[in-house]
Image (tube, grey):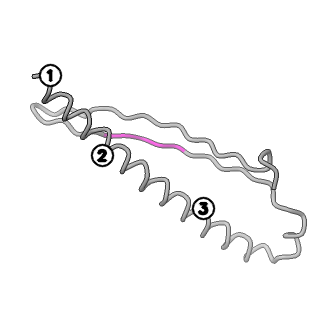
Amino acid sequence: MDPSDFTLGVKGALYPDRHGKHTKLKGRLETTVSFVLPSVLALVPEDVRRNLANAVLTSLVENMKHKVIESLLADYNSFKNEKKIHK
């Protein structure tokens, strides 16, 4: 598969959701995936291809979600520690 046969797009935003003295961090993440299947896969029944693609994409999304959450927590902890130092 050439790199041009697979495209992953990700865009998102994080924002504070303030209610009185309490603030929650909220976010939105949109992903798009496109790929070109090798012609040999045309021999595989479409329902099998679809099920396999859904399983792979679900796994990919869960992995990405886990990594984003870990990264956000690490960034927040760094921010919190910097804020304590500067007080």
Task: Give the quarter of the figure containing the N terminus.
Answer: bottom right
Query: Callout 1: helix, strand or loop?
Result: loop
Residue topped by disc 1: 86
Residue type, label 3: Leu
Q: Nearer the viewer, residue 39 or 48?
A: 39
Amino acid type, residue under disc 1 in the picture? His
Whether pointer 3 and pointer 1 mark residues with C-beta atoms closer than 8 Å, the reply is: no
Q: Which residue bears the numbered disc 2?
A: 73
Q: Which of pointers 3 and 1 lies earlier in the amino acid sequence?
A: 3
Instruction: Kindly indicate the quadrant of the structure image that contains residue 41.
Output: bottom right
Residue type pointed to by label 2: Leu
Residue bearing the label numbered 3: 57
Relative side of 34 to 31, left or right: right
Q: Nearer the viewer, mark 3 or mark 1?
A: 1
Choose the circle earlier in sequence order: 2 or 3: 3
Q: Quadrant of residue 25?
A: top left
Compared with 39, 21 (above or below) is above
Q: In the image, residue 55 lies at what x, y percent? A: 60, 70
Q: State the SS at label 2.
A: helix
Is disc 3 surrounded by few (<14), some (14 to 19) or many (20+) residues within 10 Å? few
* Residue at figure coordinates x 9%, y 32% from the top left: 21
Name the residue rendered at 78%, 73% in the picture.
46
Q: Secondary structure at mark 3?
A: helix
Q: Which residues are magenta?
A: 26-30
Q: Is residue 4 left or right of residue 15?
A: right
Residue at the image position 73 percent from the left and 75 percent from the top: 47
In magenta segment, residue 29: yes
76 w.r.t. 62: above or below:
above
